[in-house]
């Protein structure tokens, strides 16, 4: 029997990017050939991919390190180096990947064909041809390739099954698995015969089947590691329902049941809340009258605990008829039957995805004091986070959360971004933003990787700093060049007043998240400090905020204030002069950039009322900023705004003596 290995830890390293070449074209009759050094190839990625034929980590358990191939260097005649081959690690369905250094989950692969780039290969260096310009016609330098990502990871597999069989050692779980499926687990008359989880497929008919998992017997203290329970209880965490197998010959079968339920609950509250059926096994080992009496007494107690909803079977795995076994299998199927899942089109390969019609996710370029000329990517279509910050133009409601979700397809965004990059030159940053909180976009890491493979333009992200307490969020952002987290409070009370989180978040944990991110992030951090008149602009409040900011020591501190229409009337901004006066409390590079938007060039893009309405759903704004984002002229946008006002779809408000256009919410 092959050894079942359900955990593995090792180091991974993606390939190094190849060097760019320094070369000049030297041929007869070509006196001024010029530079012709090619670019280096990108380093290979480390990819983790699900393969249904792999059942455990037995083949990779002994490996200490996996490394992808480096990219080849560039060479003369504009020959680019070959990219390094990806290294693919095959894993079973149900594999969870953890970053061992931070002890947080990176990915959860639950379906055949799922794969993820877990370490990105380094970009290849540019050859000297890349640096040639009209004023620098013979550059004698090239770029070194970048190193690939390095990580220490841990793999764990949790079996995915419809039904999980649980019970004391020797209760008959493996025998039941063998009777209802084609599995052939080891079966013997002594406890702890089962030393590893077993899976079997139960076929009810040609169209209906379910997967059943059998784990080693649970004993008292299993949740703490007694016996084999702690090691393998994780394998029933993903099951749709549980079948609790009890030996009817035990003296007090109700106590056995309660003990099993207690161990499940102590290990995981979620396990104890799963649907379940109960099977009283081994009725052939006692008199039929005694078996009937035990069944009735036990059923009465279960009915008192749960009502009529629990299915209880009294049977013998070996002596019961096929009809009885089929009834049990049918109950298993009924209790785990699920509605069809929605199609997850975002998982399709990028080449197969067509652009979503009438949905603009990439906007700009927009000029700003903070990021220069920036292309924006809107990754969330509406308010998503369950914060109700007083300065935000959109408030939280019952539908908003802080859970990660899928919104747009990565392929759609990349398609649109490529078009924008080809059209616009001299872009300073690509900025990931969103109508809501961009870090709640589930595919954010994949998007960042794809952008990095598409362009060398620096990539920035603007986020609510309090969401960096989520490890899953922090791990998605490591490839960014720049992150701009916001901080608007230096203590718990002010945090509650300003952010009004729908769910309580420990302030200390939120601050800790910022510091944890700083430890592992290699890019720049520009900390935004939002100042609001009469709330956090006093000396004591500013000192509290500055204490956190100074300890974080970001690349830059930017003192800003609200400039758009806000969620709460009476929320006032401070002046630029007041912001500048507060800079003395902060150390390092501190600035108070004016947040007033500049008018941009008139464009000629053909836009419709729906384009303007979609822009306003992102956030209310002035006609100049709307026109800039839509790459159209102020006069064209003004005309469309007037039509929308007449149709009662939008209205105007006055903020800081500026006319702001906003969507009607009624």
Image (spheres, grey):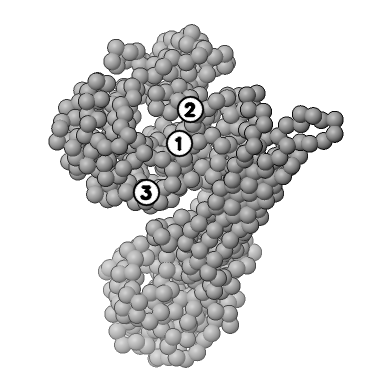
Query: How much space separates mark 2 and mark 3, taking CA atoms?
Result: 24 Å
Q: Quadrant of the C terminus?
A: top left
| Labels 2 and 3 touching (C-beta < 8 A) | no
Marked residue nearer the N-terminal end (1 or 3): 1
Q: Which residue is mark 3?
A: 517
SS class, disc 1: strand
Residue count near mark 3 (Cα–Cα under 10 Å), binned few <14, some 14–19, many ≥20? many
Residue placed farthest to the right in the image? 29
Q: Residue at x 62, y 39 (%)?
A: 141
Q: Which residue is mark 1?
A: 460
Which is nearer the N-term, disc 1 or disc 2? 2
How many numbered markers are drawn?
3
Residue at point 31% right, 80% down? Answer: 220
Q: Is residue 591 above or below residue 199?
A: above
Check the image and report above or below for 532 versus 245.
Answer: above
Coordinates of residue 648 in the picture (x, y in percent): 40, 15
> Can residue 326 be seen in the rendering of this structure?
no
How far separated are the C-alphas under marks 1 and 3? 15 Å
In the rendered image, which quarter is residue 623 located in?
A: top left
x then y, percent, for residue 531: 24, 29
Picture coordinates of residue 604 (x, y %)? Answer: 57, 13
The quadrant the N terminus occupies is bottom right
Q: Is residue 457 visible?
A: yes
Mark 1 touching mark 2, by CB under 8 A?
A: yes
Viewer-side residue, 108 vs 339:
108
Q: Residues within 10 Å of mark 1 (few under 14, many from 20)?
A: many
- The residue that label 2 is drawn on is 374
| SS of the residue under disc 2 | strand
Along the horizontal axis of the image, is 579 left or right of 81?
left
- Residue drawn 58% across and 24% down? 424
Residue 80 coordinates in the image, percent (x, y) = 70, 43
**Residue placed most toward the observer, 288 or 89:** 89
């Amino acid at each position: 029997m092959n050894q079942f290995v359900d955990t593995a830890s090792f180091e991974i390293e993606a390939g190094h990017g190849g060097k760019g070449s320094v070369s000049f074209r030297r041929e007869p009759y070509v006196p001024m050939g010029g530079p012709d050094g090619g670019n280096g190839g990108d380093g290979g990625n480390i990819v983790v991919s699900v393969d249904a034929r792999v059942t455990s980590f037995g083949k990779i358990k002994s490996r200490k390190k996996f490394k992808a191939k480096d990219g080849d260097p560039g060479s003369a005649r504009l020959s680019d180096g070959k990219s390094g081959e990806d290294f693919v690690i095959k894993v079973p369905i149900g594999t969870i990947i953890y970053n061992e250094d931070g002890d947080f989950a990176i990915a959860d692969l639950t379906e055949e064909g799922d794969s993820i780039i877990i370490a990105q290969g380094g970009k290849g260096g540019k050859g000297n041809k890349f640096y040639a310009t009209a004023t620098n016609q013979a550059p004698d330098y090239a770029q070194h390739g970048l190193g690939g990502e390095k990580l220490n990871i841990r793999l764990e597999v949790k079996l995915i099954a419809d039904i999980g069989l649980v019970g004391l050692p020797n209760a008959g779980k493996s025998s039941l698995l063998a009777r209802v499926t084609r599995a052939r687990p080891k079966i013997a008359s002594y406890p702890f015969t089962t030393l590893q989880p077993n899976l079997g497929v139960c076929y009810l008919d040609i169209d209906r089947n379910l997967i059943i998992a059998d784990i080693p017997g649970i004993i008292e203290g299993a949740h703490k590691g007694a016996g084999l329970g702690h090691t393998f209880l994780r394998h029933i965490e993903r099951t749709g329902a549980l079948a609790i197998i009890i030996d009817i010959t035990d003296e007090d079968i109700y106590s056995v049941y309660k003990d099993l339920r207690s161990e499940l609950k102590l290990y995981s509250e979620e396990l104890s809340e799963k649907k379940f059926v109960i099977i009283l096994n081994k009725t052939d080992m006692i008199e039929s009258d005694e078996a009937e009496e035990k069944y009735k007494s036990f059923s009465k107690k279960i009915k008192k605990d749960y009502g009529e909803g629990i299915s209880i079977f009294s049977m013998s795995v070996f002596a019961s008829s096929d009809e009885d076994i089929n009834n049990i299998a049918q109950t298993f199927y009924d209790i785990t039957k699920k509605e069809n899942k929605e199609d997850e089109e975002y998982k399709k390969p990028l080449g197969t995805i067509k652009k979503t019609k009438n949905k603009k996710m990439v906007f700009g370029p927009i000029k700003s004091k903070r990021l220069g000329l920036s292309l924006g990517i809107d990754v969330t279509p509406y308010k998503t986070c369950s914060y109700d910050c007083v300065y935000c133009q959109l408030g939280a409601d019952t539908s908003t959360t802080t859970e990660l979700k899928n919104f747009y397809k990565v392929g759609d965004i990349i398609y649109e971004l490529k078009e924008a990059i080809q059209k616009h030159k001299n872009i300073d940053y690509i900025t990931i933003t969103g109508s809501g909180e961009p870090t709640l976009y589930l595919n954010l890491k994949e998007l960042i990787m794809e952008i990095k493979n598409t362009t060398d333009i620096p990539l920035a992200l603007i986020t609510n700093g309090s969401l960096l307490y989520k490890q899953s969020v922090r791990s998605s952002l490591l490839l960014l060049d720049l992150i701009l987290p916001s901080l608007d409070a230096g203590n718990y009370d002010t945090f509650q007043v300003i952010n009004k989180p729908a769910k309580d978040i420990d302030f200390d944990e939120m601050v800790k998240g910022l510091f944890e991110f700083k430890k592992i992030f290699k890019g720049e951090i520009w900390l935004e400090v939002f100042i609001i008149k009469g709330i956090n602009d006093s000396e004591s409040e500013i000192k509290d905020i500055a204490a956190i900011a100074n300890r974080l020591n970001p690349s830059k501190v930017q003192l800003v204030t609200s400039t758009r229409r806000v969620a709460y009337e009476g929320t006032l901004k401070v002046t630029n002069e007041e912001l500048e006066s507060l800079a003395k409390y902060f150390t390092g590079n501190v600035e108070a950039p004016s947040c007033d938007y500049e008018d941009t060039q008139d464009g000629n893009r053909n836009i419709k009322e729906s384009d303007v309405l979609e822009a306003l759903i992102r956030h209310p704004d002035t006609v100049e900023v709307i026109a800039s984002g839509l790459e159209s002229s102020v006069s064209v946008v003004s005309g469309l705004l007037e039509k929308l006002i007449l149709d009662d779809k939008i209205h105007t408000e006055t903020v800081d003596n500026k006319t702001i256009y906003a969507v009607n919410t009624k």
